Amino acid sequence: MLKFLSKVKIEFNALDTRTAACMEFLAQCNARTAKESNPSCQLLVKRRTDSFPPQISVTFVNGVEEVFDATSTPAQTIRKMILEKGLQLETEQMFREAGEKWPVIIPEEELRQSFPGTKPRKAEEKKQ
């Protein structure tokens, strides 16, 4: 998960009862495998003393920042959204490295074409 991120900032009040997602996400970020996936990712923890709601801010490697409300979003959901965005970033990078334009625009007529599909070969045909 951290390999797609350059910075993670977790803010919460330790006495607040709504910090479960922050604590779980912090534990995931501190896991050995997560740290090994991107040692240069900054992990900042801000312990607050006011009634500010817990939040998690992540900055992706392309500079885009997203802020999650940790009171209403579970840590697993945040992790899943980061992984989905990361896969999109990897795909975009792959296309750009290949010299293709991004985003890929598929013409409307190609979207409506039927796909003939494939038929499985019989065992006898495979032997030949």
Image (spheres, grey):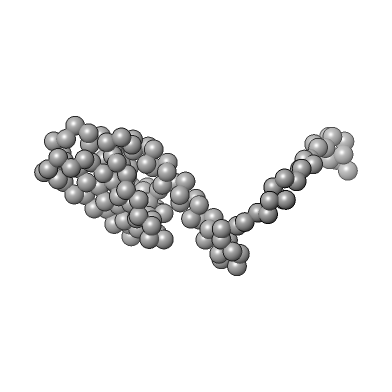
Residue at the extreme left: 49
Q: Is residue 101 left or right of residue 122?
A: left
- Measuring 83% from the left and 34% from the top, which residue is drawn there? 123
* Image quadrant where one finds the C terminus: top right
> Residue 1, percent across and down?
40, 48
Residue at the extreme bottom: 99
- Measuring 41% from the left and 54% from the top, which residue is drawn there? 4
Residue 97 in sight here = yes
Residue at the extreme front: 108
Q: Is residue 98 above or below residue 108?
A: below
Q: Give the mark count.
A: 0
Q: Is residue 26 left or right of residue 120?
A: left
> Residue 99, percent across and down?
60, 67
Q: Quadrant of residue 91?
A: bottom right
Residue 39 in sight here = no
Q: Is residue 3 left or right of residue 93?
A: left
> Residue 116, percent across and down?
79, 41
> Residue 77, percent across and down?
39, 38
- Measuring 49% from the left and 50% from the top, which residue is drawn there? 87
- Measuring 52% from the left and 61% from the top, which residue is drawn there? 93
Q: Quadrant of residue 121?
A: top right
Nearer to me, 62 or 50:
50
